[in-house]
């Protein structure tokens, strides 16, 4: 079974020689002729692209793709996927913090046991353990998935990436999204190594906040994309209920305490009409979702 390794690289000039050398050595040691490496330069401003082109000359198993500017890892994966030919896709960072041997184990498990996606979970010591723990814990809670590590080395059948929606920075959520789409998922331990050179591109406290907001966005869209009436209908009926309570209050004030307050009547009209409109929007959204689903 042909395997494509997609390796996003951003300012990894120092690591590219190690990446290509390790890939060639890995293929020779395992006698693999059906593996390809696709290096995607994500708009680097160093010589990542030039170095990759130079070291991959005369090799038809290594392809180098360049994005015009830094679009992010998700777009780099999507761009590499366009050029891939493999039935199995491995997402493999260019910093070599994972090994090709573990990538081989993942591909073998997919092929031999017919899993749709195999996730690696990191073993050993590594930085940002607490952040990783919180992120993976929340992901398991939000998406009801038992995979321990959402963002380590992973491999999947081609159909997985063809089927799931991926927006900017959603590479972190490939596993939960695939789980939502009913793909079969399992996991194996993978060893995390220190970087050969350079520094991590995923640093800073702001990334924690961005990751959490993306987590909420993915959960929101996956929940309500296929059941929009659940969102609009819930809010609509809530508005109707509030309108009913305000109306009841207005009636009590008027007939029990003989105190009329016209703005309450306006609030009743506002909430009731808003509730009805939201419920109607929910039905329309359900029709659109039904149409889109059947169009596929």
Image: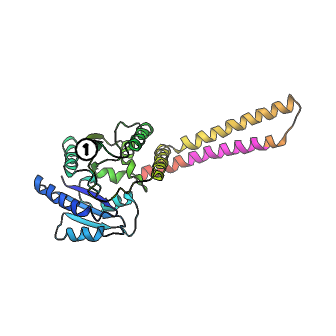
Front-most of residues 288 and 227: 227
Where does the magenta region start and end? 266-284
The x and y percentages for residue 28 are: 11, 57
Q: Which residue is mark 1?
A: 190
- Name the residue at 18% across, 61% down: 21
Front-most of residues 22 and 232: 22
Please identify the residue farthest to the top as the structure is shown. 256
- Mark 1 burial class by Cα count in 10 Å: few <14, some 14-19, many 20+: many
Say whether residue 194 is left or right of residue 259: left
Residue 271's quadrant in the figure?
top right
The x and y percentages for residue 192 are: 27, 47
Q: Residue 277 magenta-drawn?
A: yes
Vertical arrangement, residue 35 with respect to residue 143, above or below: below
Front-most of residues 133 and 259: 133
Residue 233's quadrant in the figure?
top right
Secondary structure, magenta segment, majority class: helix
């Amino acid at each position: 079974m042909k395997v494509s390794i997609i390796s996003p690289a951003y300012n990894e000039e120092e690591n590219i020689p190690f990446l290509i050398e390790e890939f060639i050595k890995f293929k020779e040691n395992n006698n693999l002729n059906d593996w390809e490496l696709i290096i995607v330069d994500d708009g680097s401003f160093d010589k990542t692209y030039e170095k990759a082109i130079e070291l991959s000359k005369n090799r038809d198993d290594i392809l180098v793709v360049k994005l015009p500017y830094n679009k992010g890892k998700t777009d780099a994966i999507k761009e590499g996927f366009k050029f891939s030919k493999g039935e199995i896709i491995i997402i493999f960072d260019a910093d070599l913090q994972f090994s090709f041997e573990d990538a081989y184990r993942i591909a073998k498990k997919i092929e031999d046991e017919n899993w749709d996606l195999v996730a690696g979970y990191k073993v050993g010591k590594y930085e940002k353990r607490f952040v990783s723990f919180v992120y993976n814990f929340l992901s398991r809670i939000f998406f009801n998935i038992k995979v321990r590590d959402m963002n380590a080395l992973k491999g999947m059948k081609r159909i997985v990436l063809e089927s799931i929606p991926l927006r900017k920075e959603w590479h972190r959520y490939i596993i939960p999204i695939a789980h939502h789409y009913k793909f079969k998922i399992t996991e194996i331990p993978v060893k995390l190594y220190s970087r050969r050179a350079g520094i991590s591109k995923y640093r800073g406290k702001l990334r924690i906040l961005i990751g959490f907001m993306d987590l909420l966005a993915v959960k929101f869209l996956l929940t309500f994309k296929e059941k929009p009436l659940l969102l609009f209908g819930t809010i609509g009926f809530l508005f109707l209920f509030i309108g009913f309570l305000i109306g009841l209050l207005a009636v009590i004030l008027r007939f029990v305490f003989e105190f009329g307050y016209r703005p309450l009547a306006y609030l009743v009209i506002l909430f009731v009409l808003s509730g009805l409109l939201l419920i109607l929007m929910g039905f329309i959204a359900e029709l659109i979702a039904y149409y889109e689903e059947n169009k596929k």
